[in-house]
Amino acid sequence: MSFFARFAQNRGALVGLIILLAIILMAILAPLVFPESPWRMVQRPFLSPMEVDGFWLGTDTMGRNVAAGLMHGAWVSLLIGLVSTVVALAIGVPLGAIAGYYGGLVDDALMRFTEFFQTIPNFALAIVLVAIMQPSVTSIVLAIAIVSWPPVARLVRAEFMSLRHREYVEAARLVGQSNTTIILKQILPNTLSPIIVLASLMVATAILLESALSFLGLGDPNVMSWGYMIGAARTVIRQAWWLSFFPGVAILLTVLALNLVGEGLDDALNPKLARERS
Amino acid sequence: MTSTTDDPVLSIRGLTIALPKGADRDFAVEDVSYDVARGEIMCVVGESGSGKSMAANAIMGLLPKGVRAVAGEVMFDGQDLLTLTEKQHRKLRGLRIGMIFQEPMTALNPLMRVGAQISEVFEAHGQFTPRERQEKALALLEEVGIPQPEKAIRAYPFQLSGGQRQRVMIAMALALAPEVLIADEPTTALDVTTQAQILELIRDLQQRRGMSVMFITHDFGVVAEIANRVCVMRHGRIVELGEAEHVLKHPQDPYTRALIEAIPSDVIPEARGAETDTPLLEVAHLDKVFRSRGGLFKPSREVRALDDVSFVLLKGETVGIVGESGSGKSTLGRCVVRLERPDHGTLSLSGIDFSALKGETLRRQRHRVQMIFQDPYASLNPRTRVGMAIAQGPIANDVPREKALAQADELLELVGLGGTADRFPHEFSGGQRQRIGIARALALNPELIVADEAVSALDVSIQAQILELLEDLKQKLSLALLFITHDLRVAAQICDRIIVMQHGRIVEQGPARDVFLTPREAYTRELLEAIPGREHELAEA
């Protein structure tokens, strides 16, 4: 059975993938549908949805088009979610792999380092980092990556510790494979499914973290994001519910879609599990 | 196929159990009928996947999810056990039908004292006061022959040995004096000497209490030791049913005959001896101590796995290392292939001290000694195609990729699995995987192969095939083989010389024939006597 067929067996994953593709499409089409900056004031403020033609989602407190903000915001949210996850994986996977494979003093040193990051509350650290580096897309991505790699390192370490004494790893050592080859070719492929599942959840958390930072006014001032939209609308939530509702639904759907896709990937990457399901 | 006995306690008639869709066959057992008579030991024998445990699970109402009995009946004391509700079943379990399992460690609660676990059986059926339960538990522990029962009753499972834990399990099963005891492979996880003791205990208890025992096993040796009657199963059907004595001496069915013949016999092949007397591997004064890392408040623990071990292995020779678990035989094997580093002593491989090498030099020399692993399921990377798994060794030793893959094809051909290089390990059976493991070990043209319990995880008939393959390859490629096993009989079949180990020391070594037929040391004799079913020989057809 092909990879996609196995993935598609999980109905939820398929739904998630469709939602995710729709959001990606939204992000790509944003500059075509709304060529103007989403920050531009285009109509009377506080237009409710469907009140005026061309403004299906209404306008915000300053008369900016909510639909335009939503579409442009999709781009920022996805970008930050993906890039910060990739950066977090780039830090966490090698650290965890080395700690788990070599064990002993190397493990002790790397894990104490990891614990140092784990003891500081995530969000507080992210706020401090963004505040120090000045809010910008780069600094937000870095801050999110720095607070989210420790779980990756711990997961990869645990997987490596349990896999390194498997007989097939010992067999690889016996035929003379180098440590690097063993880590990359024997053990890492077998840790991929939990890593991918964790990564898809991390993209979701990163989007939430970015929203939270923007909500507090620590977003990049030049880009429109869902978090900023909710943050700006929180004072008028009783007069204009749609200002926080639509970006909120967008975040919910994206995170849900990512979770569903992650679960589907887990099934598809694990041929044995997939067979038991069928 | 039915057999009638005078006084059946338990009688199974036409039992058919369906497997869930997508399993490799439709029925786990199909139209199975047999009786367990009062006061007899009935052995159900079969290889893995024969459905031998399924009937027992149906009797106890413990069928796995998705598996159900679709036809037949199981009569016990006038009622059909298949029609009972869960609540009625629970009343029966323990009280009238007791059960013991294969793995005594996982069947006991690790956080509960032994005494409490036995008392719990009484409690579950609402019998006796707490004081009386404790007294009964103590009496039971005494009955199953646990040394110092007053101490054992306060022990946790991990403080007992495997054999003692199995005794506790038996005590729990016997607590309510059931009429029938079902034993599902109760000795498979145990050493031979412990196995012999447990079999003795079961037979003894059965006679003293007049119980009926349904004993499920894969081992015809065990059958010869304790069974009154035997039922041989294959692919969910009964192939032979009858008096144990008769079935063992004059098996009617070809499958039964094959199974009995597959047991390594007492007939030891003539000593071949090595063709040369050049030593390949000289092991001198090897020591290995394992230390667990102590913490702030706990002292470190030391286990002496190897204690001054010395022996010589000649070119083209097969040496067997035999011992029970904890004897250090596996550690010795792992030191020889340098998965472990010995603390002291030398391992000289045609003149080079293999034990002193490290890092890159060791990696470059590794191809000279290869290993066949015990567990055919764990020794192949589930995500690597088998052709690649075999080619990885040569590739790591700078053979071009294309050439290595072509060689892998040839090797698969050699072990009887030609044209399967593109498949993944999960598409093979246990025996086939072990062949792949052998092909991988051969890929580097090693001078010495260490086989660590290479056949003990396999069914007897497969075991015989793998041993034949090894023997064949040895002749063809003039390999030296270090064969590590707990089974003296297997070792006697394939080895030129045998080394017996106990507590990390070599107890006895010599030509296979001599060690097997005229053992000098008491421990070797003990090991030999513990082998189940030794006296029995297949009558000439």
Image (spheres, coloured by chain):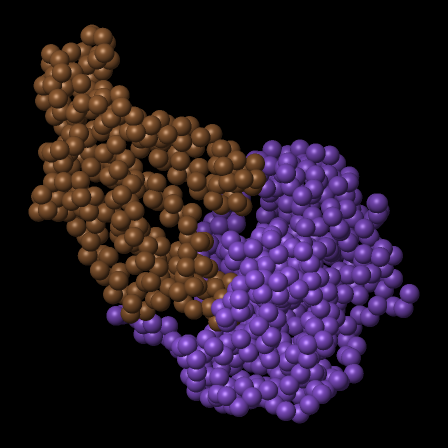
Q: Position of residue B155 (x, y in %)?
A: 44, 64
Q: Quadrant of residue B520?
A: bottom right
Q: Colour of chain A?
A: brown
In the image, residue A231 sits, relative to residue B366, either above or below, namely above
Q: Quadrant of residue A20?
A: top left
User: Would you say A67 lies left or right of B198 here?
Assistant: left
User: Would you say B509 lies left or right of B299 here?
Assistant: right
User: Would you say B75 lies left or right of B312 here?
Assistant: right
**Which of B449/B96 is in front?**
B449
Q: Position of residue A62 (x, y in %)?
A: 9, 19
Q: Position of residue B340 (x, y in %)?
A: 45, 76
In the image, residue A150 sits, relative to residue B487, either above or below, namely above
Residue B150 shows in this picture: no
Q: Position of residue B206 (x, y in %)?
A: 69, 59
**Which of A21/B35 is in front?**
A21
In the image, residue B290 sits, relative to residue B381, either above or below, namely below
Q: Looking at the image, which residue is at 66% across and 64% down?
A: B410
Q: Colour of chain B?
A: purple
Q: Looking at the image, which residue is at 75% across and 36% down?
A: B72
Image quarter hosting the C terminus of chain A: top right
Residue B495 shows in this picture: yes
- Total numbered badges shown on the rendered structure: 0
Q: Determine the residue located farthest toward the right in the rendered image.
A: B541
Q: Looking at the image, which residue is at 57% across and 39% down?
A: A1
